[in-house]
Image (cartoon, helix red, strand yellow):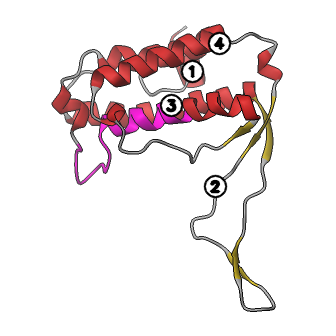
Amino acid sequence: MLSSHSQVIEQSIDLLQGLSRAEYQQVCQPLFSASIGQHMRHIIDHFDSLKRGIASTTVDYNNRSRRSETETCLATAVRHLQEVKTWLLTLSHEQLSLALNVMPEVAVHQHQHQHQHGAQEVSQPLPVASTLARELMFCVSHAIHHYALVNIIRQLQGAQVDVNFGVAPATIAYQKSLQN
């Protein structure tokens, strides 16, 4: 399981090694509002949030490093992705059942409640019970979703992209089954 997760990370490392700095930082407006670098930083932030959450058993995916060097520097992004890949390969199967609480952020607008005395309180989300295995699946699925967007950005930049980049493993398996 963890080797398949690391293979997903390896896909992005392979893609990034063929990019120029300008391609990594380009925002293909008006179709996109984020660069490949911003997508990669976002992916890495989710894995980093999960890694940080293991110690406290609470994962907060909203605690991110927006506008970090990872968004603009290819070498930094590749180094961080390699760290994620190494971390995935060091996890044991026993660790996968670790119970975690995930702090959700699903409200589009802040919800405020009025108290009797006129004070307003912002409602706090309740943590959701999960496991390390489940959250790893989420992070990998989330990465593949962003890879699909990166794939389109690369095509807009005139590049050829691996046909499986940004495609869910189940879809790849299904497509292969049709060829047999």
Labels 4 & 3 near each other (Cβ < 8 A):
no
**Residues under labels 3 and 1: Cα distance?**
12 Å
Pick whichever of labels 4 and 2 is earlier in the sequence. 4
Q: Quadrant of residue 75?
A: top left
Q: Is residue 141 visible to us here?
A: no
Q: Quadrant of residue 47?
A: top right
Question: Tag 4: residue type?
Answer: Leu
Q: Are marks 4 and 1 in contact (CB under 8 Å)?
A: no
Mark 2, other Cα within 10 Å: few <14 / some 14–19 / many ≥20 = some
Foreground tag (4 vs 1):
4
Whole-angstrom CA distance, mark 3 to mark 2, is 18 Å
- Membership of 29 in magenta stretch: yes
The dot on residue 2 is: 4
Quadrant (top left, top right, bottom left, bottom right) of the C terminus: top right
- Checking the image for residue 143, the label placed there is 3
Which numbered disc flags the more N-terminal residue, 4 or 3? 4
Question: At numbered mark 4, what does the secondary structure look like: helix, strand or loop?
Answer: helix
Residue contact between numbered discs 3 and 2, judged by CB atoms under 8 Å: no
If you read the primary sequence from the N terminus, does the residue marked by circle 3 or circle 1 appear first? 3
Residue that badge 1 annotates: 169
Q: Earlier in the sequence, mark 4 or mark 1?
A: 4
Number of numbered callouts drawn: 4
Name which residue lies at 55% across and 35% down.
46
Q: Earlier in the sequence, mark 3 or mark 2?
A: 2
Picture residue at 35% right of the left edge, 13% below the top: 14
- Residue nearer the viewer, 136 or 152: 136
